[in-house]
Amino acid sequence: MTAAATILFAREDLSIPGAVEDGPLASDQPGAVEDRFFRLLSHSKPDVIVLDFSRAPAIGADTILRIRQRTEVPILVVGSPNQPLLEEYRIAGAADCIAAPVDIIRLNQAIQQIIRVRSRGKPATNRVQSCCFGGMHFYPGRNLLIGEAGANADLTSSEGRLLSHLVAKPWTLCTRSELDTLLYGPEHIAGDRAIDVVVNRLRKKLVTVGGADAEWLIKTEFRRGYLLVADVEPLSQENSALRRSVMEPAN
């Protein structure tokens, strides 16, 4: 590859090839395989998800739609060359589809093309250091929120970009057009509800970490945009100890 990239490979049922526990969990604990996939997705923050639909493509579009509900990480589908569902996969949200069998060079080229296109024209986000606001600590490098009582939540890439933008300019209105460009790029035409969906997901995580009042930290200006109504301060060395206690496993 011309640039390093983090790739998450999965089958149609979201099981991970090579995972030792795939078989027992898939049969004994319905939903456990999918839960593991989304946990790995949250922690690894891949650049591209590669889905192998070459053997069982029947519900491939449903799988893509489930992923799309949780993340905006681009999806590359590997399908059968005789498969009639490739266009359906693209409609469901796949960035590209390539036919199996796939050699490593072709796979790398497809992944790099997706990364190049996705990064083209994206605005440079404000460089935000770890900070605290509304009784919560935000670590943008890890897309992590931690509350004073130790509750924490992982943010998706879109939620992390949105919160980074808001904390970089607290008490300042961020217009819907501005946030649309931030989240989807200048050439993307998002639906009327696209930004609201990301904001509502972020609000729920703020409540999970900071309590019921945290929902009101992101204020809505009807038809105009959103703003963070909280003072933002950089984290001190004392607060860094809390980060280590949450992020690092106990000995």
Image (cartoon, rainbow, N blue to C red):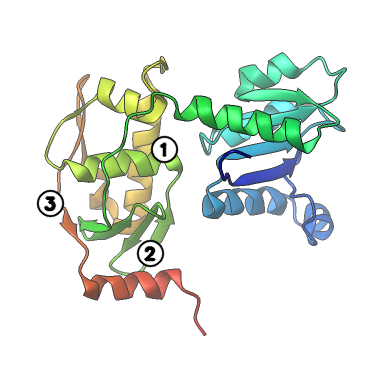
- Amino acid marked by disc 3: Asp
Residue 59 in view here: no
Residue 251 in view here: yes
Label 1 residue SS: helix
Label 3 residue SS: loop
Circles 2 and 1: CB atoms closer than 8 Å: no
Outermost residue toward the bottom? 251
Q: Residues within 10 Å of mark 3 (few under 14, many from 20)?
A: few
Circles 2 and 3: CB atoms closer than 8 Å: no
> Residue beneath label 2, please?
151
Circles 3 and 1: CB atoms closer than 8 Å: no
Q: Position of residue 243 (x, y in %)?
A: 35, 69
Residue at the image position 75 percent from the left and 56 percent from the top: 29
Q: Position of residue 250 (x, y in %)?
A: 49, 81
Q: Of the residues tagged 2 and 3, which is closer to the observer?
A: 3
Tell me if 19 is positioned left or right of 205 in this view: right
> Residue beneath label 3, please?
231
Per the rendering, the mark at residue 158 is 1
Residue at the image position 34 percent from the left and 62 percent from the top: 146
Q: Earlier in the sequence, mark 2 or mark 1?
A: 2
- Amino acid marked by disc 2: Ala
Per the model, the C-alpha gap separating discs 2 and 1 is 21 Å
